[in-house]
Amino acid sequence: AGHGQRTPFCKLAEENWDRKLIKGVFYGYLHMTFNRQTVGGHLFMEPILDSPYIDYLAAPQTYWGDSRKVGGSGNSRGLVESTLLHGKLWLDELDNGYLHKDHAPDPVHYQERYDSVFHAVQKRSTWLPLLRGAGLWYYDFGVQKGFGWWDNPRYLKTVEQIKKLTEQRLLTPAQLTAANVLYVWSQDTFYSRQQRAVAAPHQRRRATHHSSALRQKYFPDCTSFINIPD
């Protein structure tokens, strides 16, 4: 359905259901979608984010090969922070079980399936949306082969541990304190070092001046300043 049809569907569900529903759409595929954003009609974010009838947006995590594998970003497809700022939830779909080695063995002659590399991918893919204030679910296509992608005590234990820790943090009151560390990244020094040259004195002075000005304007209560060596 196009973006113009999604809001009426959610409105219809809300007005004709006998209890409160959490209504959402798969929409906002803007990152790592093989340049299909326009073809898929995912460019009209404003009416979706402004709709009072849509409670969450969802999408699978990246399908781009290198970003999905171990060492990749594994990032969400959509504009997570924009969705949250509009008072809606963002949910990632984790359907990357095919990255598991031997992901389709004979279920009759079953052996324990454990892949330490895939386990690392699972942890990354689970933590990333949670640390951005979003949610997720595991979409298990593995059952089509006679077993689940996460059908291993170690994978399930990881799910349990992350869920427990996340729930504890959600129940912990936020503590807002004055910043006591200001980290400064000097672009001048960065580009100079990339050229294997030592930053000139005037470049260092300019970076220091800018960092001091930032500190005084935006961090007046800053009590300590850490200099990161080049």
Image (cartoon, helix red, strand yellow):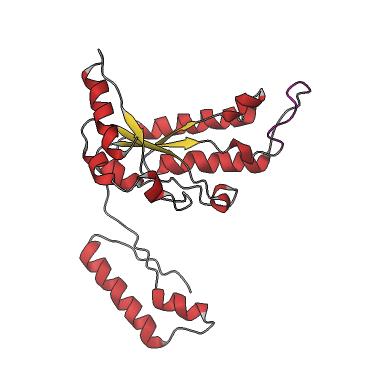
**Residue 53, position as x, y percentages in the image:** 23, 30
Q: Quadrant of the N terminus?
A: top left
Q: Nearer the viewer, residue 63 or 94?
A: 63
Q: Nearer the viewer, residue 227 or 85?
A: 85
Q: Is residue 175 visible?
A: no
**Residue 11, position as x, y percentages in the image:** 23, 26
> Is residue 97 shown left or right of residue 128?
right
Q: Nearer the viewer, residue 79 or 179?
A: 79
Q: Is residue 178 visible?
A: yes
Q: Which residues are magenta?
A: 102-109
Q: How many marks?
A: 0
Residue most toward the right? 109
Magenta includes 104? yes
> Is residue 8 shown left or right of residue 100?
left
**Position above or below: 170 against 143:** below
**Residue 195, position as x, y percentages in the image:** 52, 81
In terms of image quadrants, where is residue 7?
top left
Picture residue at 31% right of the left edge, 71% below the top = 211
* Main secondary structure along the magenta-highlighted residues: loop
Picture residue at 75% right of the left edge, 24% below the top = 110
Picture residue at 35% right of the left edge, 45% below the top = 42
Magenta includes 87? no
In terms of image quadrants, where is residue 169?
top left
**Residue 3, position as x, y percentages in the image:** 30, 39
**Position above or below: 57 against 151:** below
Picture residue at 63% right of the left edge, 41% below the top = 99
